[in-house]
Structures are given as structure tokens and as C-alpha cells.
Amino acid sequence: MAKRRVPTEFIIVRDKDKCIECQACVRMCANDVHFYDESLNKVFSDDSKCVGCHFCEMLCPTNAISIVRNPSEFKQNFNWKSETI
């Protein structure tokens, strides 16, 4: 049986029109969420590594990044927690 993917807690939204590929987010992220692809000259993000510190959002010189909570995240209740599911 295949493993199910656990939804990420945060989603990184990057405005491609505002992003100038300066790589400030790549250099400053302690969790290696952002990475630069030289062949495409683009910065990409891995939502699964994001802890929601908003540091990249604050450092972005063009305000191209925003961090939002994933709306499809499992909601914890008395019987089920996301770790259990």
C-alpha cells in the first residue's frame, strides 16, 4: 500500500512578476526552503521544509514572497492528531 502524503503546514507563495531572483531568501533561510536553479535562473521553494518563521517574507526587497497557512491541513481534535492520521 502506498504512503499518503502529509499536507504541509505552510505554503510559500512567490509572485513571479515581482521576484527579481536576488536570492536573498536562499541565502537567509536556515531550513533550506528556497533554492536557486542556475540553468533556469529561477528561485524555487520546498513547502515541506517551511516552519513559518516569515523571515524570507520580511527580507524580500520586492515583497514577492508571502507565507500562508495551508487551508487543507488536518485539524486536530480530541481523537485524531495529524501525527496519528
Image: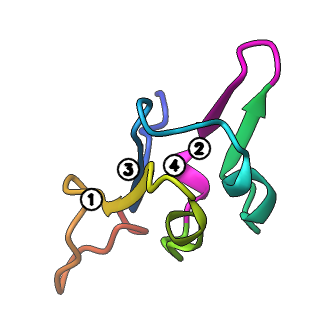
Would you name the residue on which mark 1 appears? 73
Disc 1 and disc 2: Cα gap in Å? Answer: 16 Å
Disc 1 and disc 3: Cα gap in Å? Answer: 6 Å
Left or right? Give the position of 28 relative to 83: right
Would you name the residue on which mark 2 appears? 46
Disc 3 and disc 2: Cα gap in Å? Answer: 12 Å
State whether residue 53 is above or below residue 85. below
Query: Residue 63 in the image: x percent, y percent?
Result: 44, 56
Query: Residue 66 in the image: x percent, y percent?
Result: 39, 57
**Label at residue 7:** 3
Would you name the residue on which mark 4 appears? 47
Hey, what amino acid is under mark 4? Asp
Quarter of the rendering containing residue 82: bottom left
Q: Nearer the viewer, residue 49 or 21?
A: 21
Q: Secondary structure at mark 3?
A: loop
> Is the residue under label 4 in contact with that under label 2 (CB below 8 Å)?
yes
The part of the chain drawn in magenta is 38-50
Q: Secondary structure at mark 4?
A: helix
